[in-house]
Amino acid sequence: VEALLDKLEQTDESSKMARSGLVMHIKKALTKHALQEENVVYPAMAEKLDDERAAALFNDHAEMKKALHALVECDRADPAFATRAANLRRIVLDHVVEEEELLDTLKRHLSAEENAALNSQTWREGVALS
């Protein structure tokens, strides 16, 4: 997603078709990834870590979805499009930093077998969403 956001950032108002294609790919990737996490990873975090930060990740996803919706609905030639894209980028990258920290913590609280099972379940969820 970060690479797609990089490409989107390099476009301008004259790149309406490119912007549309990139937004479609970003939406698909973020939606699939978010659902995998919300359906598998975050419940495991909440159970194993009993940490309020896990609940905050759900809130981050809600913020990300709102920003994504604003970008999807924006005219590709509108000067506000770049601002909305930058906002989405900020939300996504900030979320990744927090999430990576919690994922590392979760891994330390899981046995090798539990970690393998969680990875497998996350992969299966991704296949089901494809």
Image: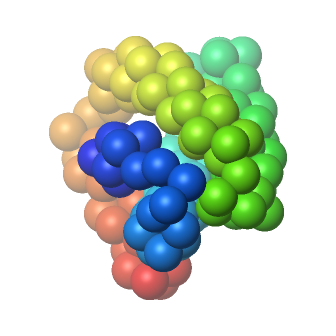
> Could you say which is closer to the camera, residue 86 or residue 36?
86
Residue 111: x %, y % from top left:
27, 34
- Looking at the image, residue 66 sits to the left or right of residue 127; the answer is right
> Could you say which is closer to the camera, residue 120 or residue 8?
8
Residue 124: x %, y % from top left:
38, 74
> Is 74 placed above or below 57 here?
below
Would you identify the image quadrant in which residue 73 lies?
bottom right
Would you identify the image quadrant in which residue 109 lies?
top left
Would you identify the image quadrant in which residue 59 lies?
top right
Say whether residue 53 is visible.
yes
> Is 29 placed above or below 44 here?
below
> Could you say which is closer to the camera, residue 40 or residue 93?
93
Please tell me how many numbered marks the rendered image carries: 0
Q: How is the image coloured?
A: rainbow
What residue do we see at 31% from left, 28% from top?
Answer: 107
What residue do we see at 41% from left, 50% from top?
Answer: 11
Residue 3: x %, y % from top left:
28, 46
What residue do we see at 33% from left, 21% from top?
Answer: 104
> Could you say which is closer to the camera, residue 32 or residue 128?
32
Say whether residue 109 is visible.
no
What residue do we see at 71% from left, 52% from top?
Answer: 78
- Looking at the image, residue 42 sits to the left or right of residue 80; the answer is left
